[in-house]
Amino acid sequence: MINEELKNEYVALYSERNKNAADEMRRIFTKVEPFEKEWNKDVSCFTSTEIVSFYKAMFFVTIESLDIMNGFLKRYTRFMLERNMVPDGQNHYEEIDNQIMCQCLDAALIAMKVIGREDLLRITKDLRNAADRFILLAFFEGLSFDDIYELSMDNFSEKKIHVSRCGRQTFLDVSDELYENAKEAADTYEYYTYDVVGNDRLGDIRSFKATDKRIIKDKCNTSEIFVDDENYQRIMHQRLYNQLLRIRKNTNNSPVIGAKELRESGRVDMIRKYMKADQLPPEKAIRKYREAIEDRYGVFSNNSISKYLLKYGKYLEE
């Protein structure tokens, strides 16, 4: 790593003021390192053109994540300027405004209506809160609003999750990513806010209620709602929906970041796996595995496979 000692000095210096920032800073320096090696210069010395090329190569899908990185590198470059380590004496990160950042986002991914698992994982890796990553993966893997807001790790048996389906109890297999994010979220009592775009800082932190053992917890400033309250389900649905909206706003209002869109994307992903495993065309795969698919994602729209294929067939044929 170029200027590793100075980078460590900067991390130590900034961590004195913001102890939560050290890991984030090291993560950013690790992302930058391959580009420093390619261009044989410290990241503080990148030109505006090189910065834009670097950002585009990172395939950002959230302006919040890109803004955090640019703000950090802007501050780091000020640090290097004070030590006369930037040959042209310019902080080119100050030239990167919101308009330029938007041009650096992965527009193709943002515009998707149906998203594959790997592309969804690219989005989740840029989200700082394990609870937010869990929500996206949970909808994608077929969990509903009713499933998600009451879940704790007690609902898991290793890589299976215990849920209710059509009045009966069942276990659904879940991915390693969902399971690991569930564990992290269950053990986390702090939440990074999304209101930092444009600000020269790494983010604000809010606290969860210390007695809340669920994966998706209530923040300390939210009023307590009891299970026997007649409005309990509606209020909990609304809280989860609002959190999903905040995540969506953070992903540049990507149309795929919605409960229905994520669930249908997961359904497409599941059908594709059956198609590949058995070398079947879409309709035959759906008819063969319909019970398993509907057990996870619910019945097909209008209870019609033909109508489903009219709407989603193009995503299954890719």
Image: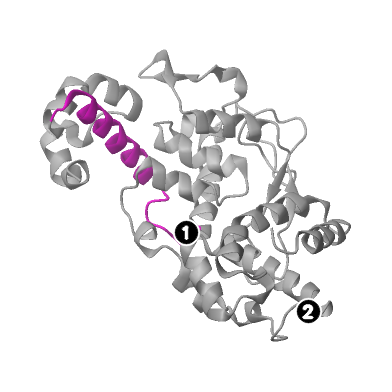
First in sequence: mark 2 or mark 1? 1
Residue at 43% in and 33% down:
144
Q: Nearer the viewer, residue 43 or 39?
A: 39
Q: Is 315 one of the magenta-colored residues? A: no
Q: Which residue is at the front of the view, 7 or 117?
A: 7
Residue 50, position as x, y percentages in the image: 54, 75
Where 46 sits versus 14, above or below? below
As helix, strand or loop, the secondary structure at mark 1 comes to loop
Q: Residues within 10 Å of mark 1 (few under 14, many from 20)?
A: many
Q: Is 61 drawn above or below residue 219 in the view shown?
A: below
For the N terminus, give its image quadrant: bottom right
Q: Which mark is residue 3?
A: none
Task: Name the residue at 76% across, 59% down.
Answer: 4
* Colour pattern: one colour
Closer to us: 241 or 234: 241
What residue would you read off at disc 2? 81
> Residue 271, how many percent across, how many down?
25, 31
Q: What amino acid is found at the position of numbered circle 1 in the picture?
A: Val
The residue shown at (35%, 25%) is 296
In the image, taking residue 287 as reference, residue 46 lies left or right, namely right
Q: Secondary structure at mark 2?
A: helix
How crowded is the residue under tag 2: few (<14 C-alpha within 10 Å), some, or many (20+)? some
**In which image quadrant can residue 44 be found?**
bottom right
Q: Is residue 274 magenta?
A: yes
Q: Is residue 17 above or below residue 293?
A: below
Of the pair 205 and 29, the residue shown nearer to us: 29
Give the magenta range: 251-280
Q: CA distance from mark 2 to mark 1?
A: 30 Å
